[in-house]
Amino acid sequence: MLAVSSELTSHKSARSLHPLSVAPMMDRTDRHCRYFLRQISRRTLLYTEMVTSMAILHGDKQKLLGFDRAEHPLSLQIGGDNPQDLAKCAQIAEEFGYDEVNLNVGCPSSRVQSGNFGACLMLQPEHVAECIAAMVNATKLPVTIKHRIGVDDVDSYEDLVRFVSIVSQSGCQGFSVHARKAWLQGLSPKENREVPPLRYEEVHRLKQDFSHLSIEINGGFTSLEQVQNQLQFVDAVMIGRAIYDNPYLLAHADSEIYGETTPPPSRHQIVAAMLPYIDEWVHQGWKLNSITRHMLQLFHGQSGSRIWKRLITEQSVFPGAGVEVLERALAEIQV
């Protein structure tokens, strides 16, 4: 196992405590989605989609990693299994100005498995620790990990403890734990988010047994009330698709979770805040629907939700479509 450089770690700042985060989601949490979510909550930690180490090292870095300053606090999630490559990626994350770098050890898709990263790495805790140690030695950013409670039949609490014990020795500063096991064969990624039962009590117990570590729980949460309840047992809570399906859920996060006193923005204010951003990107040649697709559920549960989604969906695909589409849709919704 790689040793963690005491010289480098001594200069690291402790991981900032973010009691709430929005999970990294493939084809969801791109830069436009994150900018939109940041108009709703200023404090919640956001994640990129998972980006593979090979893509970072050999692809268009600005296209893959670029982000708006307004997106902070922001964590870059990386998929990979080569310590040296991951170390270089961690350095690049720091150069780009990310607040944190996170290693994906939770994705069960067959494509990810073929690259020997994601959830299958839970079966190799010593190698994961080597990867984390290389990243820790390469950057001053906090290095964290997202993983499952187990994979296949290696899913006892003792197995989880062994994994965390080994990886924590590498200098990892935070563990985001999806409270479901992953089946590497037989279930699709979607089924792996729904079929294996949630085992929250094991994550709670993990925090008790590793009180010195930052433990975040993930899986099945759909409300801030649930978040507040979980914060009695763990340091942080991660919400995924519930946010994408109902983004305004985040509107009260800054006050209820972070203790802010500023009133939450209205849905109309959120749209208004997005217009200059959208106008800029459309004038750069981006299609309107590449941005507005993330905004379709903003009026979830409201009387105007159906017409909002219909107008945005139908009109944002036309060539030359711009902010006037949102303005027309907004005018159709009663304040």
Image (cartoon, rainbow, N blue to C red):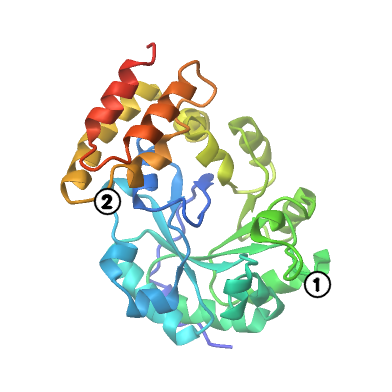
The vertical placement of 186 against 199, above or below, is below
Residue extending farthest to the top is: 334
Give whichever of discs 1 and 2 has the lower sequence position.
2
In this image, 303 relative to 94: left or right? Answer: right
Q: Position of residue 177 (x, y in %)?
A: 65, 58
Q: Which quadrant: the N terminus?
A: bottom right
Q: Is 240 positioned to the left or the right of 305 in the image?
A: right
Q: Nearer the viewer, residue 153 or 229?
A: 153
Kind of residue at disc 1: Val
Q: Residue at x 37, y 80 (%)?
A: 88
- Residue 253: give x, y in percent of width and height: 49, 33
Dot label at residue 154:
1
Position in image of residue 258 (x %, y %): 47, 35
| Disc 1 secondary structure class | loop
Rendered image quadrant of residue 130: bottom right
Report whether 241 appears left or right of 96.
Answer: right
State the mark number for residue 224: none
- How far across and down, in percent of the image, does residue 335 sit? 37, 11
Residue drawn at 62 percent across, 60 percent down: 212
Q: SS for tag 2?
A: loop
Number of residues whose C-alpha sits closer than 10 Å to that of mark 2, classed few (under 14), some (14–19) or many (20 or more)? few
The residue identified by callout 2 is 68
From the viewer's perspective, tell me whether residue 117 is left or right of residue 135: right
Q: CA distance from mark 1 to mark 2?
A: 41 Å
Residue type (three-letter) at the residue carrying disc 2: Asp
Q: Is residue 230 above or below residue 149?
A: above
Specify whether residue 116 is in view. Answer: no
* Quadrant housing residue 322: top left
Front position in the image: 90 or 276: 276
Residue at x 31%, y 16% (from the top left corner): 331
Residue visible at 35% across and 60% down in the picture: 98
